[in-house]
Image: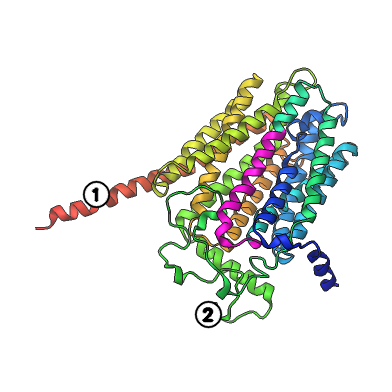
Amino acid sequence: MRNNYWSAMDCFQTSPSHSWLYPTVILCLFGFFSMMRPSEPFLIPYLSGPDKNLTSTEMTNEIFPVWTYSYLVLLLPVFVLTDYVRYKPVIIIQGISFIITWLLLLFGQGVKAMQAVEFFYGMVTATEVAYYAYIYSVVSPEHYQKVSGYCRSITLVAYTAASVLAQLLVSLAKLSYFYLNVISLASVSVAFLFSLFLPMPKKSMFFHAKPSKDIQKPSSTNAVLEERQVDETPGCDEEKPTSEIPTPSGNLDDSQWSGPKPKNVALRVFVQWFQDLKECYSSKHLFYWSLWWALSTAGFNQVLNYVQILWDYKAPSQNSFIYNGAVEAIATFGGAVAAFAVGYVKVNWELLGEMALAIFSVVNAGALFLMHYTTDIWACYAGYLIFKAGYILLITIAVFQIAINLSMERYALVFGLNTFVALVIQTIITVIVVDQRGLNLPVSIQFLVYGSYFTVIAGIFLMRSTYIIYSAKCQKKGPSFAISQNP
């Protein structure tokens, strides 16, 4: 049966797939249509309107928490499965989950149906790892930098275009929110069709890796991330010549094992993952950037999940014009511009990076407090613009700092673990603050909690950055003082 499965998957492999261009184009088309969902900026008005007639309390405390829980439960199994089945089947599963999500949104009724929507959307977000990891298994290392930029940029372009289209259709054409979801269903269905034409990879990073003698280390280790370059900063492999870097996780040569070697391949992979993670997080620089990543991503996802409910609370969509699509488009575009510009800023991130994290965390906390206290929807929109653009900017810097000097395998492991930790934190916040079994707070009070949460993050990194700068000054003064005392 297993051989029949791989034969069925390989039948989609066409002769053009040997070129880096073919899989890149197909994957970018999948990314574009999967993100071209004009219904998303107006999800809450749709759910609270006559189509679904759900209350704010039902959405906040019963429906939306399901996404957080399902995402957390599915992330680790999907991460392992993605590598084991070599990406393409998981991308296809993501396409199917998209279709089921929007079919339920269109035709499902009641709280239970919308909870099912959130579960399948949790499957969608958990399987995103396959989209971002697939391309590295079918193109050679010299193309990593180029295709990374293409695959990541196309999703931002699609999300921005979908938000603009949604706003124009709602404001000018007076289109019903129901038909925005019809357009989204059509778009994700096209994405699913493109996923079928992806060539089946011959290898993966861990379970189906090439032998170590065939591995070529890419010339730019941060090519995994974006098309932009930044100054090198020590990562988890700092102070190690290339020849001393251990064989990547997926390459299970006997030579890399100093102790007893587990005979089971899966067990050997998991043991090597643990060893790699232990080595990576031994770098304080990487550890604190990862800590900010996890803490801030948890807060960001929480804000993103409930901000439309806050907007509907400040300015009910049934009684006023709303501009959710325009706000989402501007916030995403502004964040993308800021993220692009940071690649050209020359900063000693090792010395001043955590100060930047502290300062922007203060700004994010201020934006969330503004969103809580203001009664003006435009001020609330402005706070969200500042918050989202600031997060996109900083997460881009964090991506650079963590990924410098990381191999592809370690990149996937560290970023996967950071995302998992962020989800654990977000789940704890959801259970305590949002869930009806917890404090069951109304959405306006929730944003006061989120603002306080980012204030705590700012305090942590303000103390840490102050210590770093003070230590650096002491180190500069130390040698000069010693020289002056030398006769």
**Closer mark to the observer between disc 2 and disc 1:** 2
x 45%, y 42%: residue:
344
Quick one: quadrant of the N terminus? bottom right
**Residue, x 81% and y 65% (percent of image)?**
11
* Residue 256 image position (x, y, % from top left): 54, 77
What's the amino acid at mark 1?
Lys
Point 76% across, 34% down: residue: 38
Please state which amino acid type lies under the numbered disc 2.
Answer: Ser
Looking at the magenta stretch, what is its main secondary structure? helix
Q: Report the span colored magenta.
A: 137-162
Left or right of 46 in this view: 330: left
- Residue identified by numbered label 2: 258
Q: Give the colour scheme of this rendering.
A: rainbow
**Relative side of 263 to 11, left or right:** left
Q: Where is residue 119 in the image (x, y as percent from the top left)?
A: 80, 47
51 left or right of 338 in image: right
Residue 374 can be seen in this image = no
Say which quarter of the image contains residue 366.
top right
Query: Looking at the image, is mark 2 or mark 1 earlier in the sequence?
Result: 2
Looking at the rendered structure, the secondary structure element under dot 1 is helix
Q: Of helix, strand and loop, which one carries label 2?
A: loop
Q: In this view, does 387 lie above or below 97?
A: above
Q: In which quarter of the image is residue 61?
A: top right
Mark seen at residue 477: 1
